Amino acid sequence: MTRLFRKYRRIAKSISPLEISSNFSQEDLSWDDLFLTGAPSNTTELFLGKYSKDGIKYIIERFGLDRQARHLGIRHLSVKIDTKDPFRHIVTIYNGRSRDRDHVIMEFVARYQNLIPKDIDAEFLYTQPLRVLTVEWLLLQNPKASFTPRKPRLPGQEHPGLGLGDELLALFTLMGRHLQVDGIINVPEYYHTGLLFGKRFVFLSPYIQAQVRQVSQDLWKKYRLSVIAWASATGAIVHRETREVFKWQPRKQIIPIHSQLRQYFKSEQYQQISQNLSNKPHYTIDEEKLGAALAKMDDPPFEL
């Protein structure tokens, strides 16, 4: 992940603001727009006020995502930006020229927010007001692919993923720096997505951070991701001693961009709680309960 981020950071430094904000196909783009201001004068159609449709295509090409998509059988990418709601922007990337839901490979919905830490998570002990980019919805999928026994369907999936999660997380960090926000906030709907996003995101609550790590530490050596994901979704992750069910409650996690915020998550105050893990396993999977839940499904993702 670190090596990928360093590679992407080198690429990002070679990209000018004009290359990501200009719609080069626009006939009304004037010389003044290009050379006097350095960007198009009308920014109402720019995603998050920074990225044009052509700019997003340029980013996809410069970071090699189009080549990776071709390896997945996706030959042509088309981009649509929706900025009708000035406070909630949407970018959708399609496979091919069809603009229906069956051809969506990525959808990203985000908004800027000014937040007071104590109002967004009572266990978040940071004190300074934050300007953040909040991810309201994120979809990554390959409609051309099929689920397999080795890579079965995960909770919430209609199609297999793209396998570009690490690349996206690296781009999120670079985007946060470019947008000059303090951080990027996400609220994972499922435990397994919170776990996967944990490669770059950290939970605002140090207690949730510790719990997510404890569960993954206890289960990861014995079970694959799909089993853990469906065990969480069906209430089959239980405490070894009390048999209490581990119930996932979506909580905010963040990529800290601002240096002061990054230092908070490295602080003794946060680390003492978030790193409080026991070597003795606390959680296990009730395989009988999980098996019964899978048996009730019309199309179970796998068999235990």
Image (spheres, rainbow, N blue to C red):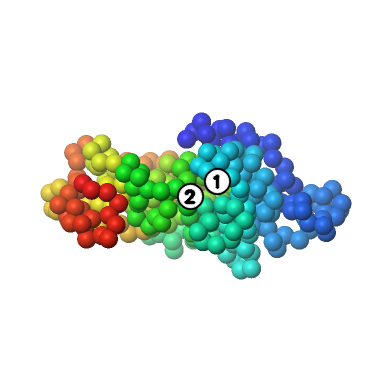
Circle count? 2
- Helix, strand or loop at label 2? It is loop
Seen in the image, is 54 located left or right of residue 197? right
**Residue 241 image point, x, y percent:** 12, 49
Front-most of residues 286 and 34: 286
Q: Look at 65% across and 48% down and name the residue there.
A: 57
The answer to whether mark 2 and mark 1 are in CB contact below 8 A is yes
Dot 1: what SS? loop
For this orientation, the residue located farthest to the right is 31
Q: Examine the image and state in which quarter residue 121 appears.
A: bottom left
List the residue tagged with mark 1. 74
Crowd around label 2: few <14 · some 14–19 · many ≥20 (10 Å): some
Estimate the x, y position of residue 147 in percent, counting from the top left: 37, 48
How far apart are the two marked residues, 2 and 1, measured between alpha carbons?
Answer: 8 Å
Q: Is 87 positioned to the left or the right of 149 in the image?
A: right
Q: Which amino acid type corresponds to the residue marked 2 in the rendered image?
A: Lys
Specify whether residue 170 is in view. Answer: no
Most extreme residue toward the bottom is: 85
Q: Is residue 53 above or below residue 64?
A: below
Please give the residue where the numbered disc 2 appears in the rendered image: 144
**Above or below: residue 4 compared with residue 202:** above
